[in-house]
Amino acid sequence: MWRFKYSFYKVYANLYGLPYETIALDDEFHVRLDAFHPECAGVVIPNPNAPTGKYVPVDSFRPLLEEHAEHVIILDEAYIDFGGESAVKLIDDYPNLLVIQTLSKSRSLAGMRVGMAFGQEDLIEGLERVKNSFNSYTLDRMALAGAAAALEDEDYFRETCLNVIRTREWTVKQLEELGCSVIESKANFVMMTHPAIPAKRLFEELHEQGILVRYFAQPRIDNYLRVSIGTDEEMKQFVDAVRKIGGII
């Protein structure tokens, strides 16, 4: 059995008939690493988590990696560049660790569907053998050229990440001043809830104004909205709209 913490993984598990167990977050939306200890075939954890944006310090994964030394532990770092530290530094110590990242977020290449995997030689060799049979987004020359250029342009990458982080922190401050609760995030989005307006209604009223956010009609997060961090002007429009919807002018 595989153990997951992110809803999308179960889609692939169901597709290939793999038994799995999803692990619930604790009361403050932290990933419960102690819940992954029972025997299993492997573990997949996004860090920072989705859709909350919560981050687990890298060294916290060491006990899990040691306990499951014979099983693959996959850490999905799609949002790692927006404030977290990558687990790539642990690879030399743990042959069972596979770190996966994407160029869709911090490298601004969402349309090209380029990802990267980091691990010891045996894991990477295994991926090379099967990737062309299972990969739903094969890479063409344009995607490879764009990926290479993005990885070489370190200055733009760092500037983009810093801009997102600054704007995210400004947005959080503004929302908290309006009385909203915001889950601490190390991603390029935040999860927020309004003190008086149900999330579904806030979602609908924002949509009427042309402001698109994510609403999940799922247990525990059905009174939260996931808000992607855009430009400074876009986030100002969002905050102003929340203020007006809440009756604060």
Image: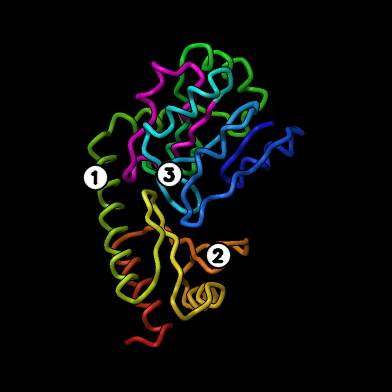
Within the magenta stretch, is there residue 63? Answer: no
Viewer-side label of 1, 3: 3
Front-most of residues 163 and 63: 63
Residue 49: image location, x then y, percent = 47, 46
Return the residue at label 1: 159
Q: The magenta stretch spans which residues?
A: 73-99
| Image point (27%, 33%), residue name | 153
Hey, what amino acid is under mark 2? Tyr
Q: How many marks?
A: 3
Return the residue at label 3: 48
Hey, what amino acid is under mark 3? Pro
Q: Residue furthest right?
A: 17
Mark 1 closeness class: few <14, some 14–19, many ≥20 residues within 10 Å: few
| Image point (32%, 64%), residue name | 172
Return the residue at label 2: 215
Mark toward the start of the polypeptide (1 vs 2): 1
